[in-house]
Structures are given as C-alpha cells and as structure tokens.
Image: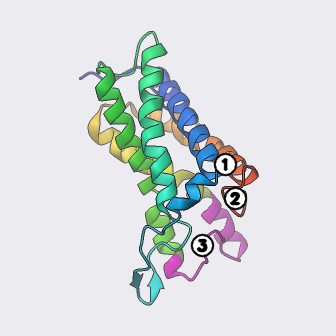
Amino acid sequence: MAPPNALSCALFLVLAFSFAGLIQARWLGSRWSRRFDWPLDAGLRFRNRRLFGDNKTARGFIAMVPASALGFALVAAVMTTPSWPLSLAQYLALGAAAGFGFMAGELPNSFIKRQFDIAPGQAPSNRVGHVLSALIDRLDSVVGMALVLGWLVPVPVSTWLIVIVVGPVLHGLFSVLVFRWGGKARAA
C-alpha cells in the first residue's frame, strides 16, 4: 500500500478525531457515562501507589473507540480521495484501533505521575514540571494513536508533524469542552 498524500492524511485524522472528540466530550459530560466510572487499574498498585488512579476509567474508552471508528468511516465516505484504499468496514476497524491507541496513550503518563505521587487530575507543583506535564498530557494520546495507526497503515512522516502541532491544540479544546459539560473536574 502506497503512502497517502501527507496533507490529505492529516486532514483526515484531524476531522475524524474532532468528530470522535465531540462525541466523547458529550458522553463524558452525560449522567449515563457515570455508570462506567470504574477505574481501569481496578485499584491495583505498584510500589504501593495506584497504577493509573481514579481518573482513568472505562468511560473514555467506551466513547472514544466506537466514536473514532464512526469518525473514520464518515470522513472516508465524504472525502473525494480517502487516505487509504480501504473498505468502509476496514475504515471502521482502523478507526476503532486508532481510538484505542489514542486512549491507551494516556496510560503510561498516568502511571509515571502516580509513581511520582502526583494526584490524578493534578500537575507537578514546580514550573518546569507543570509545563512538561501539560505538554505530555496533550501529546500522549496523539503518540498512542500514531503508534497504532503507523503499525497498521502507511502514514507519511510529515502527516505526523502536522498532527503533532494541531492535535494538542484540539486536545486542549476538547478538555475545556469536557470540563464545561461537567465531565471532569478541571479544564487542564
């Protein structure tokens, strides 16, 4: 499979994940999502500290994985030249995998924060740690998605450069939406 046009591929990813982000933000702000507010780490500990903490719950995965699948399929259906020569079913599967990677990409960062005794939803108290934490919080999901997607289909390097610039901005905007819609305690 030949690599797609870099700009077209970046636009595809931004549109598909923007759609998925809106669905997830709405879901996290809903009362129905609270039923799935159980921690992914099930309370397990490493070095007497939680693996991920109470903020990493099934709620995000339950929304992002199918929303990404749907976002990929919708964007592929409306783009005149889709990024990859795949069937609609393959776009659904690719979107689900990318959405899973997006959510799983947050877990290593949460694990590291718990090991440094940084409470869930909080940032380090020193200035450098705070800035570094904010940057990683915006990039971890994009990196997780990139690893999964790059393993499954060819993606030009320049696509990732575009997504790494645009993705964290969008991620921050969706964090504000989730906060405003009542889905999390701080806008981050």
Give the amino acid at mark 3.
Pro
> Which residue is found at the position 29% from the left and 32% from the top?
153
Helix, strand or loop under label 1 = helix
* Residue in the foreground of this view, choosing between 144 and 31: 31
- Which of the two labelled residues, at mark 2 and mark 1, occupies the earlier sequence position? 1
Q: Which residue is mark 3?
A: 120
> Which residue is found at the position 69% from the left and 59% from the top?
188
**Left or right of 188 in this view: 15:** left
**Left or right of 153 in this view: 139:** right
Region rendered in magenta: 114-134
* Residue in the foreground of this view, choosing between 167 and 185: 185
Q: Residue 96 location in percent, x, y?
A: 37, 40
Disc 2: CA contacts within 10 A as few (<14), some (14-19) or many (>=20): some
- Which of the two labelled residues, at mark 2 and mark 3, occupies the earlier sequence position? 3
Give the amino acid at mark 2.
Ala
* Residue in the foreground of this view, choosing between 36 and 156: 36
- Which of the two labelled residues, at mark 1 and mark 3, occupies the earlier sequence position? 3
Say above or below: 178 vs 154: below
Q: Residue 75 location in percent, x, y?
A: 48, 22
Q: How is the image coloured?
A: rainbow
Q: Which residue is mark 1?
A: 172
